Amino acid sequence: MRKLLLAVGAAILLAVPVLALDAHLEPWVCPEGFEGQTLSVYSWSTYVAEDTISNFEAACGVSVNYDVFGNNEEMLGRLRQGNPGYDITVPTDYAVAIMVAENLVEPLNHDNIPNIANLGETFIDPWFDPGNQYSVPYQWGTQGIAYNVNIITEPITSWEQVWTYDGPVAWQDDQRFMLGNALNLLGLDPNSQNEDEINQARDFLLERGGNVVYIAADDGQAQLAGGNVDIAIEYNGDIFQLNADCECEDYAYVIPDEGTQLWTDNLVIPADAPNHALAEVFIDYILDPQVGADISNYVAYATPNQAALDLGLIDEALLSNPGIYPSAEVLAKLFQLQDVPDAEVYFSNAWDEIRVFLGQ
């Protein structure tokens, strides 16, 4: 797996342009016939630019409802009970595989998504969705360590510094990542389906959870900004957004030396979507080079949109940030989560025990 990641990382790095191209981009145009319709999106928080939704509404003459979830398990749990009316959702790679296996997604008609041609080769035909039959990539990134540099003046480079820190820490409410990361640190497969190994990961975290005051459902950055914690395990883009919001450099994000998760989030149409046709229009809109670049420049995650890269639309400060676009050497240390249907209950039970023990 790690050799594969190194190859993927090298491909991504080579894809980043040295010079921006001087090109005139025509604005995305909505197909006719959707005026007055409604699109319902179920996604992560802080995951679009300020004008992403409003520009789509104006272009198509539609309205968009935007609901958020805190983790993949929350999203899956809701859709397993029956789609309450969502047309788009944004699962992470391994969750796409779960949704396909459980018939929770509808296939895409690529003819209605011409901007799929803008994707980089790295993101076409992924292991979790061969041929991109059900999904297209949205953003990619990592989960790592964020901290307040005004309080912690010695740079953090290791997970061990999180476990041993004498102060308040927030973990992430992401059972597959937290337990997968513990498995990785134990020298085991992050995608283990062995109950005993998953329980070893549980015990590893329990032994190191004495400084945890909060388990964050995609809002660890808010706990950090509010001064409730000094360290948070969080998504990279959330922390770079935090610095942008405060117009400061108070918060650092680091990929620890031991490695962490590399993920890709994806746009899919959940089963029984009320408006499949408008959902495909929205996906095509997101894959427009300028729209995609505007999102990545705002949320500070890495783009899978090769056209946006080739046209020089991505902020150079983001391209040169190793916390957003890691080097091939760092990418080689990262792991990817896969669907583990036979062990899903083991991860869920282990995480429930951790939350109860830590009073969360």
Image (cartoon, rainbow, N blue to C red):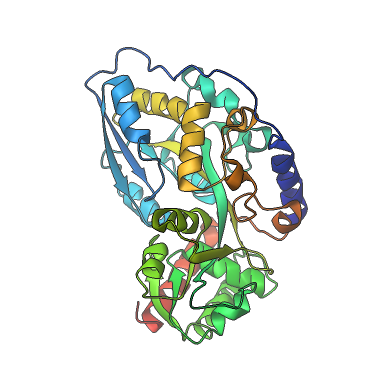
- Quarter of the figure with residue 268: top left
Q: From the top left corner, tell me how far across and down residue 233 is, in percent.
A: 50, 68
Q: From the top left corner, tell me how far across and down residue 302 is, in percent.
A: 57, 45
Q: From the top left corner, tell me how far across and down residue 32 is, in percent.
A: 33, 12
Give the residue drawn at x 35%, y 49%: 80
For the view shown, which residue lies furthest in the front direction?
247
Relative to 213, residue 8 above or below: above
Residue 327 can be seen in this image: yes
Relative to 239, residue 164 above or below: below
Q: Is residue 358 left or right of residue 139?
A: left
Q: Quadrant of the N terminus?
A: bottom right
Q: From the top left corner, tell me how far across and down residue 270 is, in percent.
A: 38, 38
For the view shown, which residue lies furthest in the top direction?
32
Give the residue drawn at x 36%, y 40%: 50
Q: Is residue 176 left or right of residue 316?
A: left
- Between residue 302 and residue 24, name the one nearer to us: 24
- Between residue 244 and residue 179, name the one nearer to us: 244
- Quarter of the figure with residue 305: top right
Q: Quadrant of the C terminus?
A: bottom left
- Quarter of the figure with residue 8: top right
- Between residue 29 and residue 5, name the one nearer to us: 29
Residue 100 can be seen in this image: no
- Between residue 340 and residue 173, name the one nearer to us: 173
- How many numbered discs sit on the rendered protein? 0
Give the residue drawn at x 46%, y 39%: 295
Relative to 11, residue 256 above or below: below
Give the residue drawn at x 55%, y 26%: 116
Q: Is residue 239 left or right of residue 312?
A: left
